[in-house]
Each structure stands twice: as C-alpha cells, then as structure tokens.
Amino acid sequence: MQCIDVYDFDGTIYRGDSTVDFLLYLAGKRKSLLLQFFPLIPAFLRLLATRDLTRFKSALFRRIGKKADLLSEGKAFWEESGAQKRINAWFMERPADVPAVIASASPEFELRWIAEKLGADDLICTRCDEKTGEVIGQNCKSSEKIRRIREKYGEVSIRAMYTDSIRADRPLLELAENRFLVSPKTGEVRRLAPEELH
C-alpha cells in the first residue's frame, strides 16, 4: 500500500486564496476580463442558494477561457504577481521520504506550474479543459479529494494531512495518521488532537 503525505493548498501551503488572487491579477492585467465577470452575477447568486461550486467554476473559467490562455496565465500569475512570496517556507522543508501530494479545489491550470516549482510529487485538484475552462468532473473538495487520490493511487496510507480547515478537509483528516492545522494568515503549523475532529 502506497504511503503519502497530503497537503491542502489555499490557506495551507499558500497564505490566502490563490484563485481569488489569480482572478484579481487577471482583472488588473486584462481590463476586458472585468466585463466577463458581470454576466456571472446570476450564477453567483445561484451558488449562494445551491452551493454548486462545480457549476459556478465552470461558468467562471469558461468566461476567462474565451479571452485568455488559461495555462499561460496560470504560469504568469506565479511569475509576475509576487504570489510566490505567500508560500509558507515550511513546505520546502517537508519530509521527503514519502510522496508529497497537493490536493486542492483550485483549478489545475492555475497550480500546475507552482506545484512543479515547489517539487510536489503529485497535484490533484479541480480538472478543467485548458482550452475552454469547462470543469471536468467535480470540484475537488472534501470527500472528492479522497476519491481522486484513490483513483490515482488505489488504497493509500495517509501518513500526514495538512490543512487550514477541519470542516472542509475532515474526511481526509479522519484517514490520516497525523493531522496538522495551518493558520491561513501566519502559516503556523500545529498538531491536531484526535478530539478536535469531533
């Protein structure tokens, strides 16, 4: 059975929400993209009612994909915006004896370049068609992260799980031998006691 360490990305490895920062970067760089966001207001209101993040992200990334090359803009965001300064240094000092798997709800086109630069062994996140922006499958959050990890590795042993949110990543935390909670503001890491999951 494969043993892995799993790391959430936003609020964990990265201090903040990288997708929000990516969208702000794009809006500042390409003013025409702001016009693409206005038609999404009804979709955003539906999201508030239904919490269907997969549908909302599809609508959002399809709009952006009409005006921008998603993969190129994902790389440019990390190279040009200063976002790399918000990566927590402890991730670079992580144990290297088992694969480090980043599991995130952020889109793959946005995280691929930074995951490679950080030396992550694997990246499991929300899949999108890189040409159209259409989300493929489900938003990679909560139990979907487990499904995707098992799709790739089969049954695995999760030695450690790092996250900024017990609520969002409870399914993975319950499977992990060691659990760590990261402050999304400071990047400080502390070990979770078993009773904190309940």
Image: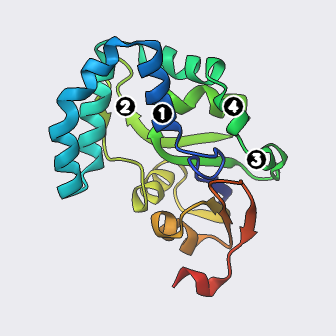
Give the vertical position of 29 relative to 107 (above or below).
above
Q: How is the image coloured?
A: rainbow
Give the label, 4 or 2, closer to the camera: 4
Task: State the SS at label 1.
Answer: helix
Residue type pointed to by label 1: Glu
The image quadrant of residue 1 is bottom right
Residue type pointed to by label 4: Gln
Circle 2 crowding by C-alpha within 10 Å: few under 14, some 14–19, many from 20: many
Query: How far, Cα to Cα, is label 3 from label 1?
Result: 19 Å
- Circle 2 sits on which residue? 128
- Circle 3 sits on which residue? 91
- Circle 4 sits on which residue? 84
Q: Residue at x 52, y 56 (%)?
A: 154
N-terminal label among 3 and 1: 3
Circle 1 crowding by C-alpha within 10 Å: few under 14, some 14–19, many from 20: many
N-terminal label among 4 and 3: 4
Can you give x and y, in whole percent of width and height, for residue 130 in the image?
Answer: 39, 21
Query: How far, Cα to Cα, is label 1 from label 4?
Result: 17 Å
N-terminal label among 1 and 4: 4
Residue type pointed to by label 3: Phe
Is the residue under label 3 in contact with that under label 4 (CB below 8 Å)? no
Is the residue under label 4 in contact with that under label 1 (CB below 8 Å)? no
- Circle 1 sits on which residue? 108
Viewer-proximal residue among 76 and 133: 76
